[in-house]
Image (spheres, grey):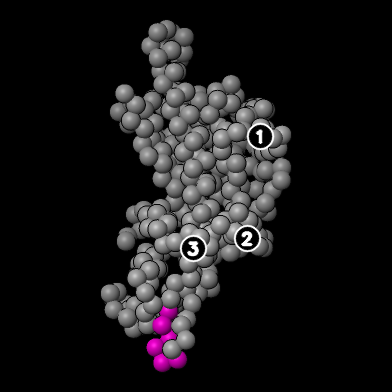
Amino acid sequence: MQLAPRIAGARLDAIFAALADPTRRAIIARLTSGEASVMELAEPFAMSQPAISKHLKVLERAGLVSRGRDAQRRPRRLEPKPLAEASEWLERFRKNWEGNFQRLDTLLDELKSAQKKSPHAKR
Amino acid sequence: MTSPGSLKVTTPSDREIVLTRGFDAPRKLVWEALTTPALLKRWLLGPPGWTMTTCELDLRVGGAYRYEWRKEDGTVMGMGGLLREVVAPERLIATERFDQSWYPGEGLVSQVLTEQGGRTTITMTLRYESKEARDMVVKSGATSGMELGYARLAELLAAAPAGSGR
C-alpha cells in the first residue's frame, strides 16, 4: 500500500531516470506542444546538437520519445503512454500517502491537545 | 488552526522516491506517532478500506518490525524489516520487504524529522534495489495509462526533483 509501490521494473526506472534531468524535462515539455527536429530542440539551450542528441537517446530508451517518419527532419515526438504510466503510478502513490498524512494530522492535533491538558503526561 | 504543508513527491534518481510533508506539531510528537504501534495503527493505512491488523516495532538498532493490513474484502498484506538507525526524535532508517514483493530485493526507508518554529517536516526517502528488476509491474497503470492525457504531465514534471534547475 505504501505503501504499495508496485514499482520497479526496469521500465519505470528508466522513465524516472530519464526525467531526473532538467534539460530532458524541458525537452519533454517542448514536445508536448508538438513534434520537433533535433535542431529545433537544441535552439533554446546553450548546447550543441550532439549533446541534445545524447539526451534524446536517453528519452528514447525510456520509451518517452520516438522518431517521426519524415526522413529528412527526423522529428522527435512524445510517446504519451509510458509517461502516463509513470504519472499514474506516482499519483496513486501520492494519494495513498496524502491519506496517511491527513490521518496523521488529525492524530497530532489530538496528541497536542492531550498534552496541553496534562503537560506532565508526556515527556 | 492546522495548516499542514502539502505533500511533495519527487523522484531524484531511478531508485529513489522522496516524500516531504510539513506537520503542525513539534518533532517529539511526530516521532511518537511514527514509532508507537498504537499510534501507527491509527494513520498508516494506505487506501480507503484497509485497517492495520498487526503493528509490532522493536524500537532499537537491529530491532525488527512487522506490519500487516487487511482490506474489507479479506485481502491481507504484510511487510517488515529491520531498523538500521534509530535517533530519537530525528532519524529512523529501516529496511522494508513486502510479503508479496513485486520488486526484487529490499527497500530502504529513511525518515528524517526537522523542526522549525514548532512545525515539523518529515522527509521520507524510499530507496529500492532495482538492479535485478526485470519487467515493469505497474499493472493497473499500464491499463488505464492510455486514457491519461498531457494534463498529468505538468503534474509529473512539477513533481520531478526540485533544486536541479529548471
Residue B71, which numbered label?
1
For the C terminus of chain A, the quadrant is: top left
Determine which of the numbered discs, if any, sits on residue A83 in the image.
3
- Residue that label 2 marks: B136
Please state, as top left, top right, bottom left or bottom right, where the N terminus of chain A lies in the image: top right
Instruction: Please name the residue shown 53% across and 69% down the image.
Output: A62
Name the spot of residue B9 as percent of width and height, x first. Answer: 44, 48
Of mark 2 and mark 1, the one earlier in the sequence is 1
- Chain ID at mark 3: A
Front label number (1 vs 3): 1
Q: Is residue A63 above or below residue A90?
A: below
Q: Residue at x 29, y 74 (%)?
A: A45
From the viewer's perspective, tell me whether residue B145 is left or right of residue A108.
right
Q: Which one is in front in this view, the residue at disc 2 or the one at disc 1? A: 1
The chain to which mark 2 is attached is B
Q: Is residue B25 visible?
A: yes
User: Vertically, is A64 above or below A76?
Assistant: above
On screen, residue A74 above or below B85? below
Secondary structure category for the residue under label 2: loop
Binning the other alpha carbons within 10 Å of mark 3 as few (below 14), some (14 to 19) or many (20 upward) gives many
Q: Main secondary structure of the magenta part?
A: loop
**Label 1's element?**
strand
